[in-house]
Image (cartoon, rainbow, N blue to C red):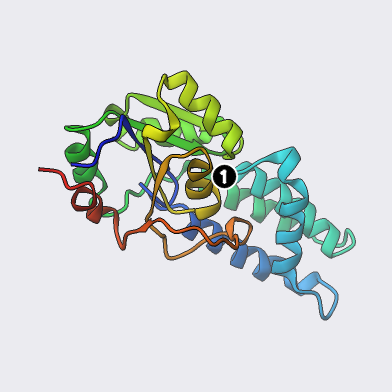
Protein backbone atom coordinates (compact mmCIF):
# COMPACT_ATOMS: atom_id res chain seq x y z
CA UNK A 1 0.00 0.00 0.00
CA UNK A 2 1.37 3.42 -0.96
CA UNK A 3 2.39 5.57 2.00
CA UNK A 4 0.49 8.87 2.38
CA UNK A 5 -0.81 10.76 5.40
CA UNK A 6 -3.93 11.93 3.57
CA UNK A 7 -5.69 11.48 0.23
CA UNK A 8 -7.31 14.67 -1.08
CA UNK A 9 -9.98 14.83 -3.76
CA UNK A 10 -11.18 17.57 -6.03
CA UNK A 11 -14.99 17.74 -6.30
CA UNK A 12 -16.32 19.12 -9.61
CA UNK A 13 -15.76 16.62 -12.43
CA UNK A 14 -13.82 14.34 -10.08
CA UNK A 15 -16.60 13.23 -7.73
CA UNK A 16 -19.62 14.65 -9.55
CA UNK A 17 -20.56 16.04 -12.94
CA UNK A 18 -20.15 19.78 -13.47
CA UNK A 19 -18.55 20.87 -16.73
CA UNK A 20 -21.23 19.28 -18.88
CA UNK A 21 -23.73 21.79 -17.47
CA UNK A 22 -21.38 24.71 -18.12
CA UNK A 23 -20.85 23.50 -21.69
CA UNK A 24 -24.60 23.26 -22.17
CA UNK A 25 -24.90 26.77 -20.71
CA UNK A 26 -22.37 28.12 -23.19
CA UNK A 27 -24.25 26.57 -26.10
CA UNK A 28 -27.53 27.97 -24.79
CA UNK A 29 -25.88 31.39 -24.52
CA UNK A 30 -24.86 31.17 -28.17
CA UNK A 31 -28.38 30.19 -29.21
CA UNK A 32 -29.89 33.12 -27.31
CA UNK A 33 -27.38 35.86 -28.13
CA UNK A 34 -26.13 35.03 -31.65
CA UNK A 35 -29.29 36.32 -33.41
CA UNK A 36 -28.55 39.81 -32.02
CA UNK A 37 -24.76 39.79 -32.51
CA UNK A 38 -22.96 41.55 -35.40
CA UNK A 39 -22.02 39.29 -38.28
CA UNK A 40 -18.66 37.57 -37.89
CA UNK A 41 -18.60 37.64 -34.07
CA UNK A 42 -17.62 34.36 -32.40
CA UNK A 43 -20.19 34.58 -29.61
CA UNK A 44 -18.84 31.67 -27.55
CA UNK A 45 -15.26 32.96 -27.75
CA UNK A 46 -16.46 36.41 -26.70
CA UNK A 47 -18.13 34.90 -23.63
CA UNK A 48 -14.90 33.09 -22.69
CA UNK A 49 -12.96 36.35 -23.06
CA UNK A 50 -15.31 38.07 -20.62
CA UNK A 51 -14.99 35.16 -18.17
CA UNK A 52 -11.19 35.40 -18.40
CA UNK A 53 -11.32 39.14 -17.75
CA UNK A 54 -13.57 38.66 -14.73
CA UNK A 55 -11.71 35.80 -13.04
CA UNK A 56 -9.80 38.02 -10.62
CA UNK A 57 -13.02 39.78 -9.56
CA UNK A 58 -15.74 37.13 -9.79
CA UNK A 59 -13.74 33.94 -9.30
CA UNK A 60 -15.21 30.59 -10.35
CA UNK A 61 -18.60 28.93 -10.34
CA UNK A 62 -22.13 29.28 -11.61
CA UNK A 63 -22.74 32.80 -10.31
CA UNK A 64 -19.52 34.06 -11.88
CA UNK A 65 -20.53 32.42 -15.15
CA UNK A 66 -23.96 34.02 -14.96
CA UNK A 67 -22.65 37.53 -14.37
CA UNK A 68 -20.13 37.13 -17.19
CA UNK A 69 -22.86 35.81 -19.50
CA UNK A 70 -25.06 38.84 -18.87
CA UNK A 71 -22.12 41.21 -19.34
CA UNK A 72 -21.06 39.44 -22.54
CA UNK A 73 -24.60 39.50 -23.95
CA UNK A 74 -24.81 43.26 -23.45
CA UNK A 75 -21.31 43.88 -24.76
CA UNK A 76 -21.56 41.63 -27.83
CA UNK A 77 -24.84 43.21 -28.95
CA UNK A 78 -23.84 46.77 -28.02
CA UNK A 79 -26.74 46.88 -25.59
CA UNK A 80 -29.43 45.77 -28.04
CA UNK A 81 -30.01 42.32 -26.55
CA UNK A 82 -33.69 42.04 -25.55
CA UNK A 83 -34.54 41.90 -21.86
CA UNK A 84 -36.27 38.58 -22.55
CA UNK A 85 -32.90 37.08 -23.45
CA UNK A 86 -31.37 38.34 -20.19
CA UNK A 87 -34.31 36.84 -18.32
CA UNK A 88 -33.74 33.47 -20.00
CA UNK A 89 -30.05 33.59 -19.11
CA UNK A 90 -30.92 34.30 -15.48
CA UNK A 91 -33.40 31.42 -15.40
CA UNK A 92 -30.75 29.12 -16.86
CA UNK A 93 -28.32 30.09 -14.08
CA UNK A 94 -30.98 29.63 -11.38
CA UNK A 95 -31.72 26.14 -12.70
CA UNK A 96 -28.01 25.31 -12.67
CA UNK A 97 -27.68 26.46 -9.05
CA UNK A 98 -30.60 24.38 -7.83
CA UNK A 99 -30.12 21.12 -9.73
CA UNK A 100 -29.28 17.98 -7.72
CA UNK A 101 -25.71 16.73 -7.49
CA UNK A 102 -25.01 14.00 -10.06
CA UNK A 103 -22.31 11.66 -8.77
CA UNK A 104 -19.84 10.07 -11.15
CA UNK A 105 -19.77 6.29 -11.34
CA UNK A 106 -18.05 4.34 -8.53
CA UNK A 107 -17.35 7.43 -6.40
CA UNK A 108 -19.14 6.30 -3.23
CA UNK A 109 -17.57 2.87 -3.36
CA UNK A 110 -14.06 4.24 -3.95
CA UNK A 111 -14.33 6.76 -1.10
CA UNK A 112 -15.53 4.04 1.24
CA UNK A 113 -12.66 1.73 0.33
CA UNK A 114 -9.91 4.36 0.33
CA UNK A 115 -11.26 5.88 3.55
CA UNK A 116 -10.68 2.60 5.38
CA UNK A 117 -6.93 3.10 4.94
CA UNK A 118 -6.34 6.88 4.79
CA UNK A 119 -7.87 10.10 6.12
CA UNK A 120 -9.66 11.86 3.29
CA UNK A 121 -9.95 15.55 2.39
CA UNK A 122 -12.14 17.37 -0.11
CA UNK A 123 -10.47 20.40 -1.73
CA UNK A 124 -12.55 22.28 -4.26
CA UNK A 125 -12.83 25.84 -5.57
CA UNK A 126 -15.73 28.06 -6.54
CA UNK A 127 -18.64 29.86 -4.94
CA UNK A 128 -18.78 29.14 -1.19
CA UNK A 129 -22.58 28.91 -0.95
CA UNK A 130 -23.07 26.70 -4.00
CA UNK A 131 -20.12 24.41 -3.30
CA UNK A 132 -21.14 24.02 0.34
CA UNK A 133 -24.66 23.08 -0.80
CA UNK A 134 -23.25 20.49 -3.21
CA UNK A 135 -21.06 18.94 -0.53
CA UNK A 136 -23.93 18.80 1.95
CA UNK A 137 -26.43 17.30 -0.51
CA UNK A 138 -24.05 14.94 -2.31
CA UNK A 139 -24.27 12.22 0.31
CA UNK A 140 -20.45 12.18 0.46
CA UNK A 141 -19.66 14.62 3.29
CA UNK A 142 -19.29 11.90 5.91
CA UNK A 143 -16.28 10.46 4.07
CA UNK A 144 -14.09 13.53 4.64
CA UNK A 145 -12.05 14.60 7.66
CA UNK A 146 -11.44 18.01 6.05
CA UNK A 147 -13.44 20.07 3.54
CA UNK A 148 -11.88 23.15 1.94
CA UNK A 149 -13.65 25.47 -0.51
CA UNK A 150 -11.11 27.80 -2.10
CA UNK A 151 -11.14 30.91 -4.26
CA UNK A 152 -8.15 29.63 -6.23
CA UNK A 153 -5.97 26.55 -6.39
CA UNK A 154 -2.29 27.47 -6.55
CA UNK A 155 0.78 26.31 -4.61
CA UNK A 156 0.48 29.02 -1.96
CA UNK A 157 -3.16 28.22 -1.28
CA UNK A 158 -2.52 24.49 -1.10
CA UNK A 159 0.41 25.12 1.27
CA UNK A 160 -1.86 27.04 3.64
CA UNK A 161 -4.53 24.34 3.43
CA UNK A 162 -2.08 21.55 4.23
CA UNK A 163 -0.66 23.61 7.10
CA UNK A 164 -4.16 23.92 8.58
CA UNK A 165 -4.55 20.17 8.24
CA UNK A 166 -1.22 19.64 9.97
CA UNK A 167 0.13 17.53 7.10
CA UNK A 168 3.41 17.81 5.20
CA UNK A 169 2.69 18.45 1.50
CA UNK A 170 5.12 15.69 0.56
CA UNK A 171 2.84 13.24 2.36
CA UNK A 172 -0.28 14.24 0.40
CA UNK A 173 -1.83 12.54 -2.62
CA UNK A 174 -4.22 14.80 -4.56
CA UNK A 175 -6.78 13.28 -6.94
CA UNK A 176 -8.42 15.50 -9.55
CA UNK A 177 -9.41 16.10 -13.15
CA UNK A 178 -7.64 19.42 -13.80
CA UNK A 179 -3.90 19.40 -14.41
CA UNK A 180 -3.80 23.18 -13.92
CA UNK A 181 -5.70 23.25 -10.62
CA UNK A 182 -5.36 19.81 -9.03
CA UNK A 183 -2.09 18.33 -10.25
CA UNK A 184 0.67 20.85 -10.90
CA UNK A 185 0.21 23.03 -7.78
CA UNK A 186 0.43 20.02 -5.46
CA UNK A 187 3.42 18.62 -7.31
CA UNK A 188 5.12 22.01 -6.99
CA UNK A 189 4.99 21.50 -3.20
CA UNK A 190 6.53 18.03 -3.47
CA UNK A 191 3.24 16.20 -3.19
CA UNK A 192 1.88 13.36 -5.31
CA UNK A 193 -0.97 13.90 -7.74
CA UNK A 194 -3.25 11.50 -9.61
CA UNK A 195 -5.02 12.75 -12.72
CA UNK A 196 -8.47 11.34 -13.47
CA UNK A 197 -9.66 13.22 -16.56
CA UNK A 198 -13.26 14.20 -17.24
CA UNK A 199 -14.45 14.14 -20.87
CA UNK A 200 -14.89 17.94 -20.87
CA UNK A 201 -12.48 20.60 -19.61
CA UNK A 202 -13.17 24.32 -19.41
CA UNK A 203 -10.96 26.28 -21.79
CA UNK A 204 -9.49 28.36 -18.96
CA UNK A 205 -8.30 25.17 -17.22
CA UNK A 206 -6.10 24.07 -20.13
CA UNK A 207 -2.36 24.38 -19.54
CA UNK A 208 0.84 23.30 -21.32
CA UNK A 209 3.22 21.26 -19.16
CA UNK A 210 6.06 18.75 -19.20
CA UNK A 211 5.34 17.06 -15.87
CA UNK A 212 4.79 13.33 -15.49
CA UNK A 213 2.17 11.98 -13.09
CA UNK A 214 -0.23 9.08 -12.65
CA UNK A 215 -3.05 9.23 -15.17
CA UNK A 216 -6.01 6.93 -14.50
CA UNK A 217 -8.88 6.16 -16.83
CA UNK A 218 -11.42 6.24 -14.00
CA UNK A 219 -11.63 6.92 -10.28
CA UNK A 220 -12.50 3.24 -9.99
CA UNK A 221 -8.81 2.53 -10.74
CA UNK A 222 -7.58 4.49 -7.70
CA UNK A 223 -7.68 1.64 -5.13
CA UNK A 224 -5.56 -0.54 -7.40
CA UNK A 225 -3.09 2.33 -7.98
CA UNK A 226 -2.83 2.76 -4.22
CA UNK A 227 -2.28 -1.02 -3.99
CA UNK A 228 -4.90 -1.35 -1.28
CA UNK A 229 -5.14 -4.77 0.35
Q: Where residue 92 sits in the image (x, y, percent)?
A: 58, 53
- Determine crowd level at label 1: few under 14, some 14-19, many 20+ residues with C-alpha closer than 10 A: some
Q: Residue furthest right?
A: 78
The image quarter in which residue 153 lies: top right
Q: Which residue is mark 1?
A: 94
Judge from the rendering whether residue 215 lies leftward or rightward of residue 68; answer left or right: left
Task: Name the residue at 60% across, 60% down.
Answer: 207
For the C terminus, which image quadrant?
top left
Judge from the rendering whether residue 129 lies leftward or rightward of residue 35; answer left or right: left
Q: Residue furthest bottom?
A: 40
Secondary structure under the numbered disc 1 in the rendered image: helix
Front residue of 81 and 57: 57
The image quarter in which residue 4 lies: top left
Task: Name the residue at 55% across, 52% down.
Answer: 180
The image quarter in which residue 121 lies: top left
Q: Where residue 125 sits in the image (x, y, percent)?
A: 54, 38
Please say whether residue 129 is visible from this viewpoint: no
Task: Name the residue at 78% across, 57% down.
Answer: 72
Front residue of 219 and 87: 219
Judge from the rendering whether residue 60 lies leftward or rightward of residue 195; answer left or right: right
Q: Where residue 108 sits in the image (x, y, percent)?
A: 23, 43
Q: Residue furthest left?
A: 229
Q: Is residue 203 above or below residue 101?
A: below
Please say whether residue 12 is visible from this viewpoint: yes
Front residue of 153 and 109: 153
Q: Where residue 223 sits in the image (x, y, percent)?
A: 20, 48
Q: Is residue 122 above or below residue 10?
A: above
Amino acid sequence: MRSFDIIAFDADDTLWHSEDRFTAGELRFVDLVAPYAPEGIDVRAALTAVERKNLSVLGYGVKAFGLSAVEAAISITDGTVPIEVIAQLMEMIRAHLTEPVRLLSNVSEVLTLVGRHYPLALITKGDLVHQTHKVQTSGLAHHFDHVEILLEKDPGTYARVFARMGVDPTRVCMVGNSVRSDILPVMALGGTAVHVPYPLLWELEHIEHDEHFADLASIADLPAWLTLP
